[in-house]
Amino acid sequence: MQEEALVDIKFRLYDGSEIGPFRYSATSTVDMLKQRIVSDWPKGKTVIPKAMNEVKLISSGKILENNKTVGQCNIPFGEVAGGIIIMHVVVQPSLAKTKTEKKIDDSPRKIVCSCSIL
């Protein structure tokens, strides 16, 4: 029976600090990685993800999809050779909160026509 390949992944945050490294198998999903990031998020940061859907993972310039496995993300396992893969973490707060906070202008608008009839 062949042993499953494991890879060390470190997550780099927006301010240059890092979470990890952690060891994952090729069958681990991106969703699992995001769960780990949210649960291990450092205290005292100005931006804090409240849910996994606010976290985006970037590897090799591509945003990784939740349903993909680490092996499907075309991460160069063979080239690493015992090294650590670094993934960038972007926190994108949900838009629902910002949309409700926008001020809605309910004041009546004047209808102004700037047409010229000759």
Image (cartoon, rainbow, N blue to C red):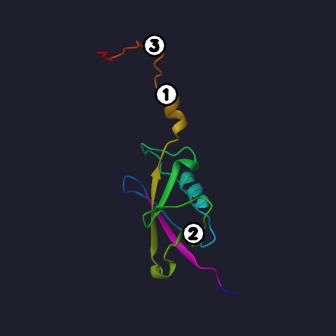
* Residues tagged 3 and 2 counted as in contact (Cβ below 8 A): no
The numbered disc on residue 107 is 3
Relative depth, front residue between 66 and 106:
106
Indicate the position of residue 77 as horizontal and vertical percent values. Answer: 51, 78
Mark 1 or mark 2: whose residue is earlier in sequence: 2
- Residue range in magenta is 3-12
The numbered disc on residue 101 is 1
Distance from Cα at disc 1 to Cα at disc 2: 37 Å
Give the residue type at disc 1. Answer: Glu
Q: Extreme bottom residue here?
A: 1
- Compared with 99, 118 (above or below) is above
Label 1 neighbour load within 10 Å: few <14, some 14-19, many 20+: few
Relative depth, front residue between 76 and 10:
76
Label 2 neighbour load within 10 Å: few <14, some 14-19, many 20+: many
Q: Quadrant of the C terminus?
A: top left
Label 3 neighbour load within 10 Å: few <14, some 14-19, many 20+: few
- For disc 2, the marked residue is 70
**Residue 36: quadrant of the picture:** bottom right
